[in-house]
Image: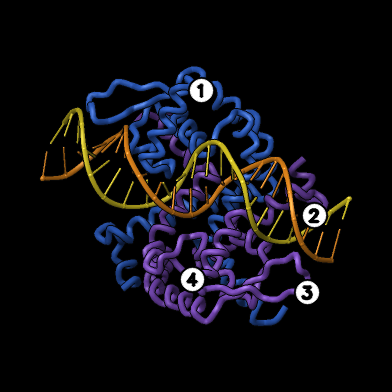
Chain colours: A purple, B blue, C orange, D yellow
DNA sequence: TATTGTTATACTCTATAACTATA
DNA sequence: TATAGTTATAGAGTATAACAATA
């Protein structure tokens, strides 16, 4: 391999969106069999997972938190409701479509977590639990940073100067 | 917000595939306008970007490196070839479909890079260039770690013991 | 016989705009 | 008037299996 090609490869590795995509692909592939086993798509799973950690959520919150566009979410609601995994929740704002897990939905969630736990521990040990925490923190902070780029009033002064 | 909900939120933040997806979503949104401007989809752009850093690549390599399944790649080849952005390359193994950028393809690539560079620098400065490098390194290393999980012979002894 | 890639097929997601209902 | 969500629609990606061509 030539010097130029080595440099080129490093540049490709350093593309942030692509690196995030590739890393997500391999980690998703590790856990996807446990999702497939319950006839769930990854977006459907993200909805169940988000609902498992809240009493109830509206469509907009789920859309943002699970990275699913509203039209897709409408279909996912229909699917998961018909399968008895989620149910509508009364809300004082009639525009909002709030949903929560049913008992069956929670059971499915708990099953997937239990079945995949061994692989998660295997991954955490192989990578190093502390490095995994560091990575997760960096991901969250990068997300916050990028979101603040669109809203410069929230930016700390130092960063504003450096970015300019 | 209750104690339980705070804990729940943290758990959702700590899902690796979801965190990777959400971070990719915001970073992609930052750069996507520059891709859209040239009537490219993100997968098409990944192909151009990979080819820009190699003389020529075959479909299998591109499929892995760009996270695109072979059937999608076939369609993308057809699209980019018809637009004159890539061209087939002769190869000693006639099974392989090798392609390379045309001059037009390279021009489009350079244009996108030039147009988006200011935003990339803005992001790197806001997040911290060194932290960005750390994040990119961790992403690459995590990818390697997960891939080795499927191929335990490659695992260092210490990790094998800890994982077992 | 194994590998590379294409085709076929069905389903899902992506993305935008237009529309309804509610605040 | 602004917001939340649904519907409609077109296009692209996801995923699998079956197939053809080549090694």
Residue name at image x 70 percent, y 76 percent: A90
The Cα atoms of the two marked residues, 1 and 3, are separated by 56 Å
| Nearest to the observer: residue D11 or residue B145 | D11
Residue name at image x 55 percent, y 32 percent: B40
* Mark 4 or mark 3, earlier in chain: 4
Residue B16 seen in this snapshot: yes
The Cα atoms of the two marked residues, 2 and 1, are separated by 38 Å
- Chain bearing tag 1 is B
- Chain bearing tag 4 is A
- Chain bearing tag 3 is A
Q: Nearer the viewer, mark 1 or mark 4?
A: 4
* Mark 2 or mark 3, earlier in chain: 3
On whether disc 4 and disc 3 are found on a single subunit, the reply is yes
On whether disc 2 and disc 1 are found on a single subunit, the reply is no
| Nearest to the observer: residue A38 or residue C8 | C8
Report helix, strand or loop for mark 2: helix
| Nearest to the observer: residue B134 or residue A44 | A44
Point out residue A45 in the picture as x, y percentages from the top left corner: 50, 65
As drawn, the label of residue A92 is 3
As drawn, the label of residue A154 is 2
Judge from the rendering whether residue B14 lies leftward or rightward of residue A162; answer left or right: left
């Amino acid at each position: 391999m030539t010097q130029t090609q080595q440099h080129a490869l490093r540049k490709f590795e350093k593309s942030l969106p692509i690196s995030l995509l590739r890393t997500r692909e391999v980690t998703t592939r590790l856990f996807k069999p446990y999702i497939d086993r319950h006839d769930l798509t990854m977006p459907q799973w993200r909805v169940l997972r988000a609902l498992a950690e809240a009493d109830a959520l509206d469509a907009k919150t789920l859309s943002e938190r699970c990275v699913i566009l509203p039209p897709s979410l409408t279909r996912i609601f229909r699917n998961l409701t018909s399968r008895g995994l989620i149910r509508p929740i009364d809300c004082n704002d009639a525009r909002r479509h709030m949903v929560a897990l049913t008992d069956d939905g929670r059971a499915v969630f708990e099953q997937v977590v239990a079945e995949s736990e061994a692989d998660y521990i295997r991954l955490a040990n192989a990578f190093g639990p502390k490095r995994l925490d560091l990575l997760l923190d960096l991901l969250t902070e990068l997300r916050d940073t990028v979101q603040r780029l669109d809203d410069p009033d929230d930016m700390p002064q130092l960063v504003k100067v450096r970015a300019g």
